Amino acid sequence: MFCVVVNQRDNTEVDIQDEVVNAEFVISSGEAGCRVEDYLSPRLPLLSRTKLRVLLSRQGVTCSGRALTTGMRLKEGDRLQLRWNKREVLPLPPEPAELAVLWEDGAMVAVDKPAGMLVHPTLGVKRGTLTGTLLAKWNPWLHEGMLVNHAATPVIWPSFLHRLDKDTSGVVLVAKERDTARAISADFVARTVRKSYLAIVEGKVANDAVRVDAPIARIAEEAPHFGVREDGASAISLLRVLGRVQGRSLVLLNPLTGRTNQLRVHAAHLGHPILGDVSYGAAANERMFLHAWRIAFTHPATGETVVVTAPPPEAFRRQWPEPWPETIPEDSTEIAALR
């Protein structure tokens, strides 16, 4: 049975059986010259820019039967027909949830991501992500059923400037708009953003300070996906031992490059996998004990250095039987000499 529901507020038709959204937009004189993706973004608030590009590439938006593509400019009087199958281009629902904000201004926010939370949705996991939580935090008016918004209320989408694995906790820096994201992303590429991680690793690391210069490549479709290989991409990490006890070491890690799983791969390469990192050879534990502790960057608008730290989770303290260090160095003579 074919069933159509019409939302009286925005005249959006939703085919319940096929999960298809049909809508039409008419371009006014004030909207002429707008890029199609800029026009659609606030009107399809549950689609990211990436998903919008996918929708356009699949001819989900047409004008007089002509497919529209990213970058095309709209003209006054254009009638855009939307036919969007939610099964093919999945919307992202906003998900209000508790989130520890470490630092925030009008352009960016640094949050403390808990272990077990994905940054982005994946093919297998669509809910409970940091993306959905921030979408809800920054757009409290937005709800899961708002597939089309003819009012074109601007939507703030999170632009992640770096990534953390699902099982890594700690500070994540996120931009609220694209210009800031581009500026900070350039600093990441130039390696002027300084990141420090805390980890508990298996075994007693012999040297107090270690420089790991070992290229990383994708080695398998199943975990572990990455490993040290001679023809891999250059990868350099610095390690400083903060303490040793009962077959474990507490370490400070500084990645000088940004390869996927870099710190996990390098720790395992040294023969000291991160506690709980089963994929890279450690015994199972309540979680993987890697925590993004500190990030320092230059604010693109003010030029000031911003330093954000995320307190180590209680789980770390439970796994470390000795008193936790009263102070953790931002860097060290040993580490600096190894750069």
Image (cartoon, rainbow, N blue to C red):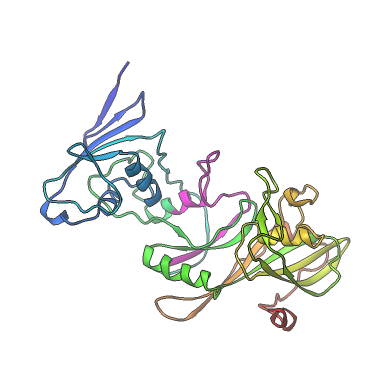
Q: Is residue 179 left or right of residue 69?
A: right
**Residue 205, magenta (yes or no):** no
Please, is residue 219 above or below residue 211 in the view?
above
For image coordinates 49% across by 63% down, the residue present is 161
The quarter of the displayed image where residue 146 is located: top left
The answer to which of 321 and 87 lies nearer the viewer is 87
State whether residue 313 appears in this view.
no
Q: Position of residue 87 (x, y in %)?
A: 41, 33
Residue 285 position, x and y percent, is 77, 49
Q: Is residue 338 above or below residue 68?
A: below
Q: Quadrant of the C terminus?
A: bottom right
Query: In which quarter of the view is residue 57 placed?
Result: top left
Q: Which residues are magenta?
A: 108-134
Is 275 displayed left or right of 177 in the figure?
right
Measuring from the top left, give residue 100's x and y in whole percent: 54, 59
Left or right: residue 135 compared with residue 309: left
- The extreme top residue here reads 1
Q: Position of residue 300 (x, y in %)?
A: 42, 75
